[in-house]
Image (tube, rainbow, N blue to C red):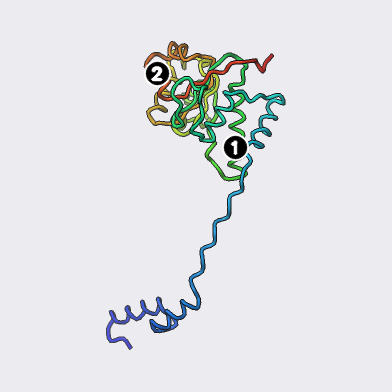
Amino acid sequence: MAKSAQEAIQNLSQRMKNPDGLSDGQIRNRRSVYPKAATPDPKPRRRVAFDDLFKSEAGKVCQAYEVIPQVACIVQYFLRDWKFGEGIVSNQPDLNKGLYVHGTFGTGKSMIFGIMHEIGRRLILEHGYQGMWFTSVTAPWLVEEYMKSTDRSYMGNFDFKSYTRGPLYIDDLGMERPAFGRDDVIADLLFERHRNQARTFITSNLSPQSFSQKYGPRLGDRLPEAFNIIEFTGKSYRE
């Protein structure tokens, strides 16, 4: 019997550690007979054949989809291939930058991002992999929703701040109108995203020079710093 409360607590603690009342030697012998169970290996992640996945999604968009060098460059970028961009990116290629893809109408700029967006969605749903996912919007939609959200009667869930972080694709940049005829919401968004070091993917008919003219030299000067600049040329898919 314990002679004090402190001794009782010590005895209880010992019994919790050694409920069978074994000596130290007996415990060591038992552990040698019954070694600690090995930790099971984690379930191996199923290997994904990316080429097959890409062909599948590209075929849904266009049966005659052509993988031109610019498309291959963008795919390499999303696969995090540090060799991407050689001879295609007009400034210094960098996987930590976003993508600014410009060119004339119908050359497949939006198409490749639509394909990559769907691949990213499937990788999350089918494999739990989030590395290729990005939010996708158009510049005109962003401005329109922003203006609606300022109305007291607005019942939607648009939150401008939610678009200032995380991977974001903006299509049709330059096609938007100024909010309320005066506020450049897109310029404000791009500034904030650059400050947050958030990767942005853009498709536009604006060349880098036209971009600078529209959004101002302060933002235009940051274009090579924040984006890998790629020009799409070739036949139009709209013909």
Where disc 1 sits, the SS reads helix
- Give me the residue at 45% from left, 29% from top: 94
Where is 96 relative to 181, above or below? below
Where disc 2 sits, the SS reads helix
- Give me the residue at 40% from left, 31% from top: 197
Horizontal relation, residue 5 to residue 207: left or right: left
Looking at the image, which is closer to me, 158 or 64? Answer: 64
- Give me the residue at 39% from left, 17% from top: 221
Q: In which quarter of the image is residue 198?
A: top left
Q: Residues within 10 Å of mark 2 (few under 14, many from 20)?
A: some
Q: Position of residue 181 (x, y in %)?
A: 46, 12
Contact (Cβ within 8 Å) of mark 1 with mark 2: no
Work out which quarter of the rendered image holds the C terminus and state it. top right
Residue holding disc 2: 219
**Residue 147 visible to the viewer:** no
Q: Quadrant of residue 113?
A: top right
Q: Where is residue 192 in the image (x, y as percent from the top left)?
A: 40, 26
Q: Position of residue 157 (x, y in %)?
A: 51, 32
Q: Quadrant of residue 187?
A: top left
**Residue 100's disc number:** none
Residue holding disc 1: 121
Total numbered labels placed on residues in the image = 2
Q: Which amino acid does label 2 sit on?
A: Leu
Between the residue at mark 1 and the residue at mark 2, the CA separation in whole angstroms equals: 31 Å
**Residue 3 visible to the viewer:** yes
Work out which quarter of the rendered image holds the N terminus and state it. bottom left
Q: Which amino acid does label 1 sit on?
A: Arg
- Which mark is first along the chain, 2 or 1? 1
Where is 6 relative to 198, above or below? below
Looking at the image, which is closer to me, 168 or 9? Answer: 168
